[in-house]
Image: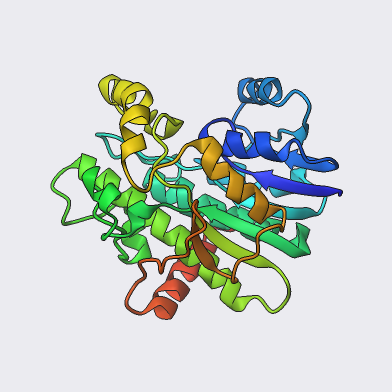
């Protein structure tokens, strides 16, 4: 087997667990973008026997995203858009003036996919790490203050304009959940327009306490998330670990677990209907048209 798989957000959590699992496959090369040389060194230390490359990419800067694809030349058999951020008390904007969760979790991955399309193999598999937080009926997400995706106008999402949110903390939760909803819509959109053999999906890894997602939260929240929640979460339905969630995800990316094109699948293998906008096709076309504006500077 000679395959090349690209994974964003592979320096910790699910991304790292996925890279570690895939690195045991003979003939597999991993492309793991990193923000700086220090992250590259950490990855190589964590994956000492892997065949990998670590090109520089900062998903919080669109100029970095636009200049990334020309660094690559090998055809890609699979791509996993896994990197994600969630802000804490303050609403953070990127250098491009965009709300951070929208920019990193959705827009940069969209621009990156458009740039990588010429490198995708005819039967490539492309995935997005989504989240149950996008579903307002998700009980676990509700316990953490998530109210589900808000399918607002793309311009409003890009600016973090959640009028119903009482404070910045709720804006950030809404922005994160909404960005995960956009990940689901992206997979469904590209699957619907696919005329060949490429496959697209979105993946809910479950609540993975102890991962780095809370790194921008306060010190107390980080301590609870890292040390207390991994114990408590064992009693909660819909929870997992990075290693557990990486098992099925690796099989999907290797083509060993087939899914309907555009599927939204949980780490358990269950395919529940995702939460969608009332007029999905119209909304998604508006979203894609807005996102395509950022392909070029």
At x 36%, y 22%, the residue is 227
At x 58%, y 31%, the residue is 11
Question: Residue 113 falls in which quadrant of the image?
Answer: bottom right
At x 59%, y 34%, the residue is 16
**Side of 279 relative to 262 (left or right):** left
Front-lying residue, 9 or 167: 9
Tell me if residue 211 comes above or below residue 26 in the rendering.
Answer: above
Residue 165, position in %: x, y? 17, 51
Tell me if residue 207 comes above or below residue 118 in the rendering.
Answer: above
**Side of 2 relative to 117 (left or right):** right
At x 65%, y 64%, the residue is 258
Residue 73 is at least partly visible in this image: no
Residue 201 is at least partly visible in this image: yes
Front-lying residue, 113 or 52: 52
Front-lying residue, 105 or 128: 128
Residue 49, position in %: x, y? 78, 26
Question: Residue 283 falls in which quadrant of the image?
Answer: bottom left
């Amino acid at each position: 087997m000679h395959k090349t798989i690209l994974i964003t957000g592979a320096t910790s959590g699910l991304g790292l667990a996925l890279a570690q699992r895939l690195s045991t496959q003979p003939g597999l090369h991993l492309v793991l973008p990193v923000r700086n040389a220090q992250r590259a060194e950490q990855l190589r230390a964590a994956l000492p026997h892997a065949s990998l490359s670590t090109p520089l990419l900062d998903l919080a800067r669109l100029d970095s995203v636009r200049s990334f694809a020309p660094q690559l030349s090998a055809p890609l058999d699979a791509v996993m858009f896994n990197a994600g951020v969630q802000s804490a008390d303050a609403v953070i904007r990127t250098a491009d003036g965009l709300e951070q969760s929208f920019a990193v979790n959705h827009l940069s991955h969209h621009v990156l996919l458009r740039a990588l399309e010429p490198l995708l193999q005819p039967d490539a598999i492309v995935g997005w790490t989504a989240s149950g937080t996008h579903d307002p009926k998700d009980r676990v997400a509700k316990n953490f203050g998530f109210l589900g995706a808000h399918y607002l106008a793309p311009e409003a999402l890009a600016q973090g304009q959640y009028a119903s949110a009482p404070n910045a903390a709720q804006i950030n939760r809404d922005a994160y959940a909404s960005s995960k909803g956009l990940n689901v819509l992206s997979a469904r959109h590209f699957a619907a327009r696919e005329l060949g053999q490429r496959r697209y999906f979105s993946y809910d890894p479950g609540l993975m306490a102890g991962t780095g997602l809370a790194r921008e939260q306060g010190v107390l929240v980080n301590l609870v998330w890292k040390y207390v929640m991994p114990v408590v979460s064992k009693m909660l339905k819909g929870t997992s670990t990075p290693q557990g969630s990486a098992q099925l995800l690796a099989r999907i990316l290797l083509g060993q677990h087939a899914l309907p094109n555009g599927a939204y699948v949980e780490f358990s293998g269950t395919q529940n209907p995702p939460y969608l906008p009332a007029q999905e096709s119209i909304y998604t076309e508006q979203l894609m048209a807005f996102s395509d504006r950022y392909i070029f500077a």
